[in-house]
Image: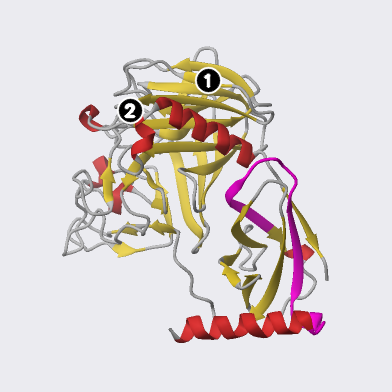
Amino acid sequence: MKKKLSVLLLIIVLITACKNGEKEAFTEIELTNNSNFELIDKPISINRSLIKKIDSVNTYPLIIYKADTIPSQLNDLDGDEKWDELFLVANFAANEQKNILLKWVKEKPSYIVRTSVRFGKRSSATSPVQPKTSEIMLANELPKSLGYQQYQTDGPSWENDKVGFRHYLDGRNSKDLFGKKISKMSPETVGIDSLGAVVDNYHVMEDWGRDILSVGNSVGIGGYALATESDLMRLGVTVNDSINNIEKTTFKISNEGPVKSTLNYSYENWRPIDNRNYSVKEMTTIYPGIYGYKNTVSISNLQGDENLVIGLVNINNDNPLTVIDENEKYIVLYTHDKQTYDKEWWLGMALILPKNKYLGYTEAPKTGNLSNTFLAKLKVENDQPISYYAIATWEISDKKFISKDYFSNYLKKLTNQLSTKINIKILN
């Protein structure tokens, strides 16, 4: 209550200062939606270099719009332990302009948490899981060689107010799906018991939701691989392998905040077949309001005959893949079926891909170390990042997603939102 009152008091002070022309206390920022689209929870990244007034004493941003605060956070994007962006999400009507005020405050404002990352590890089969923010895993540290699963939920999990995901850091590097029933963040104890032991307690329905997707030997929803005309090269291995084809895997939670969370991965000396040795960097980002996450991948040591392939698991789906090609910047591939475990619930899954990189799609074999998945093919160049989105909508989250047309319309609106750029202008 005290925090809410102090924020309200500050808003009153700022509004009064604005009326009196005291502009030195804050930075005024003009945000403009020049499109004909309504934008909900539109992410906005303001580069540090644009902001002239940065307080060295009061170090937390407070964003004011009219009589309201807009949740925001500072993020370190390059790992130098200094913030690079001021990040927020905001709603815009078509062709709307908003003038927001940035004030630096001493105490960190408290906001409703709308994104989260969870990661934990145990050091032995009998040790309890401890929360961690980073990890280095070597090729011989897979569950089959260790004799136990060392990671909570097999690796990091991340979520927003709509949906959750997890990454199999244990060598498989697949992306799995958590369906959410509530907007609040799921408990930190998902994947461990009361003693801190690693357990599978998320394939049953809880108040927050559950794991709803069968992944098998696919790369899940948004996982990736490389392909040539003759070879399909999985990043990592399967659950049956004891030695990884990646020499060193590094993971870090780079940012975790109320409106944005970021995970970074590095894969060194990935040798999927003879005479191929790659290095990969990956960044996963989630922000509120979207039924999905953004992924950015760059690969080194390419030989020139490879395509990046992005996976959309096809284990419990009986319907054909649908393509939406209506947006100038993005192309959408999606499936819609009762494709959860035991075909119990309707689930729509999609990939939103950069159109200038898209080369069509194929389907992986039904067996093998990368199987049962649609694969979107993208042109990839050495050390050049490619960004795409993985989307999942569950009927328990919103019953309207039972309808294929409703899901398709959501994807069309989302691609319009993603392709719309907010114009940012610093006024003082």
Is residue 199 or residue 90 the one in the foreground? 90
Is residue 73 rendered magenta in the image? Answer: no
* Quadrant of the rendered image containing residue 204: top left
Instruction: Name the residue that disc number 2 marks.
Output: 217
> Is label 1 or label 2 in front?
1
Mark 2: which secondary structure? loop
Instruction: Name the residue that disc number 1 marks.
Output: 323
Q: Which residues are magenta?
A: 20-45
Is residue 330 or residue 387 the one in the foreground? 330
Position of residue 178 in the picture relative to residue 281 (left or right): left
Position in image of residue 239 (x %, y %): 28, 35
Q: Residue at x 80, y 80 (%)?
A: 23
Position in image of residue 324 (x %, y %): 55, 22
Dot 2 amino acid type:
Asn
Q: Tell which residue pokes out farthest to the top in this image.
A: 230
Position of residue 316 in the picture relative to residue 74 (left or right): left
Q: Residue at x 28, y 60 (%)?
A: 123
* Quadrant of the rendered image containing residue 364: top left
Name the image quarter holding the C terminus: bottom right
Is residue 41 rendered magenta in the image? Answer: yes
Dot 1 amino acid type:
Val
